[in-house]
Amino acid sequence: MKVKVPKEIKIGTYKGFVKFREHIKVDDGYRGAYNQRTGELYIDPILLMLRDRTLLHEVVHMISFNYECSWNEDDISRMANGLAEFLVQLGIEFDWSEIEGE
């Protein structure tokens, strides 16, 4: 089952405006980024299969910020990877067709 990636994600008081940003991986060494101040949630479009996991990683960051979980980067990666695996087992696939570049 395909699920459209929304242009805006809301977790508690945090909003994430999902956009593609090229070269994050090459320039900064990250696959994605979430800016709490602007609410922009960027995913590097070249990732292909890692896009879903990267989106979930940034959403888990939003959860951690909103609920003051104090999870470190490794904790967030483990949570996102577990969620990604579970969604795949359910047959859920993300549809990125409505996400635009910056």
Image: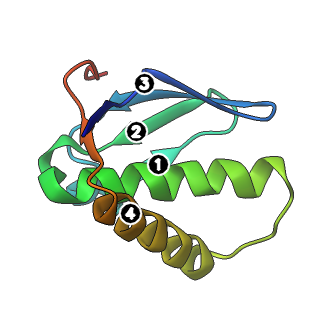
Front position among marks 3 and 2: 3
Q: CA distance from mark 4 to mark 1?
A: 17 Å
Residue position for label 2: 42
Report x, y in % for residue 8.
52, 22
Front position among marks 4 and 1: 4
Amino acid type shown at disc 3: Pro
Amino acid type shown at disc 4: Ala
* Sequence-wise first label, 3 or 1: 3
Residue position for label 3: 6
Q: Where residue 84 is drawn, which disc sits there?
A: 4
Residue position for label 1: 33
Vertical side of 87 occupied by 81: above or below: below
* Sequence-wise first label, 1 or 2: 1
With 99 as the anchor, is 49 left or right in this view?
left
Relative to the observer, which residue lies in front, 44 or 92?
Answer: 92
* Sequence-wise first label, 4 or 3: 3
* Callout 1 secondary element: strand
Report x, y in % for residue 91.
26, 54
Q: Where residue 59 is drawn, which disc sits there?
A: none
Q: CA distance from mark 4 to mark 2?
A: 18 Å
Relative to the observer, which residue lies in front, 32 or 84?
Answer: 84
Q: CA distance from mark 1 to mark 2?
A: 5 Å
Q: Residue drawn at (72%, 73%), measured in percent from left and top?
A: 71
Q: Residues within 10 Å of mark 3 (few under 14, many from 20)?
A: some
Is there CB contact under 8 Å for labels 4 and 3? no
Front position among marks 3 and 1: 3
Q: CA distance from mark 3 to mark 1?
A: 16 Å
Is there CB contact under 8 Å for labels 1 and 2? yes
Is there CB contact under 8 Å for labels 4 and 1? no
* Sequence-wise first label, 3 or 2: 3
Which quadrant, please, contains the C terminus?
top left
Q: Residue drawn at (66%, 47%), measured in percent from left and top?
A: 62
